[in-house]
Image (spheres, grey):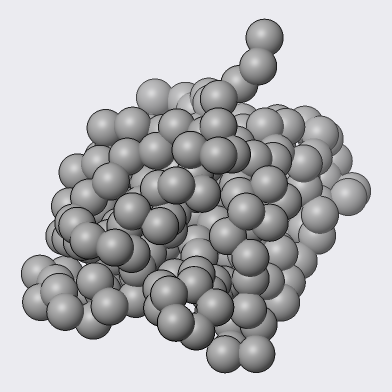
Amino acid sequence: MKVQTRILLVAEEGLARSAYTEVLRNLDVDFDCISSPDEMNTRLTSARYNGVLVDVPTMIRCECVDKNRITHIMERFPVLRLMYNPEFGGIRGLAHGGTIKDNRDLADFIINDCIPFPARSVRVSERKDIVFNVLLMNERDEEHLDAERTVTINVSEHGCFIYTINTWELLRPAWMIVNEFEDKTPVELKVRWRGQWGSNMSMPGIGTSFESMTAHQYAQLHSFI
């Protein structure tokens, strides 16, 4: 069964939005339109998306309530910033974190960046900037011979982001031992998203969900959060 791609478009009503939506309809992808970046958090916590399109003039004109939160959200999705000028080439796309020389075609971005990207939503629980010293493993190895010594960058009650430059497959299991936990039982994780080294000028690592944790570990986690 075909999995439908879903895109969130942030653009005020007008000619630019009409031009973007025409391309999306021709590509046969689902999309939702919002007129302000301030609506992104609500949309992205209530539905799953494969990518985000942001009209640059819309972003510039918006007096966003929490620009840091919006930037944090966009780091978790394929993002293409858009400009529309019917007199000078129509639609121009600029990948998030790229330069003016890195023009991207909107259709190419949807096909090559968004469609392969697993749809996700934004977690409701807030992430905290907590650094745990961890041993990261791709198997539950009691001797930890192949464990990677690394750290968490942020943590929520549902998961964490772990710094790593190694390659991890999406949706695969992983395990970590948290040095700061009294209970050193390996915590089972699942890789939900990944940021690769040199991609979009963001920190490399993996976003994970907690799949299993002992009651004592969970209590300790909450005390840190």
Q: Residue furthest front?
A: 87
Number of numbered tags placed on the structure image = 0
Q: Residue furthest top?
A: 1
Can the viewer see residue 59 in this picture?
A: yes
Q: Which residue is rendered at x = 82% and y = 45% of the image?
A: 144
Q: Residue furthest bottom?
A: 100
Indicate left or right for 96 with 123 as reference.
Answer: right
Residue 128 percent coordinates (x, y): 32, 59
Q: Of residues 41 and 148, which is closer to you in this image?
A: 41
Q: Which residue is rendered at x = 68% and y = 56% of the image?
A: 108
In the image, residue 71 above or below residue 132: below
In the image, residue 210 above or below residue 18: above
Indicate left or right for 213 with 195 as reference.
Answer: left
Q: Of residues 140 and 46, which is closer to you in this image?
A: 46
Which quadrant is the N terminus positioned in?
A: top right
Can the viewer see residue 200 in this picture?
A: no
Indicate left or right for 73 with 223 as reference.
Answer: right
Indicate left or right for 146 with 53 as reference.
Answer: right
Q: Of residues 138 and 21, which is closer to you in this image?
A: 21
Residue 143 percent coordinates (x, y): 85, 41
Q: Which residue is rendered at x = 63% and y = 71% of the image?
A: 104
Residue 21 percent coordinates (x, y): 40, 48
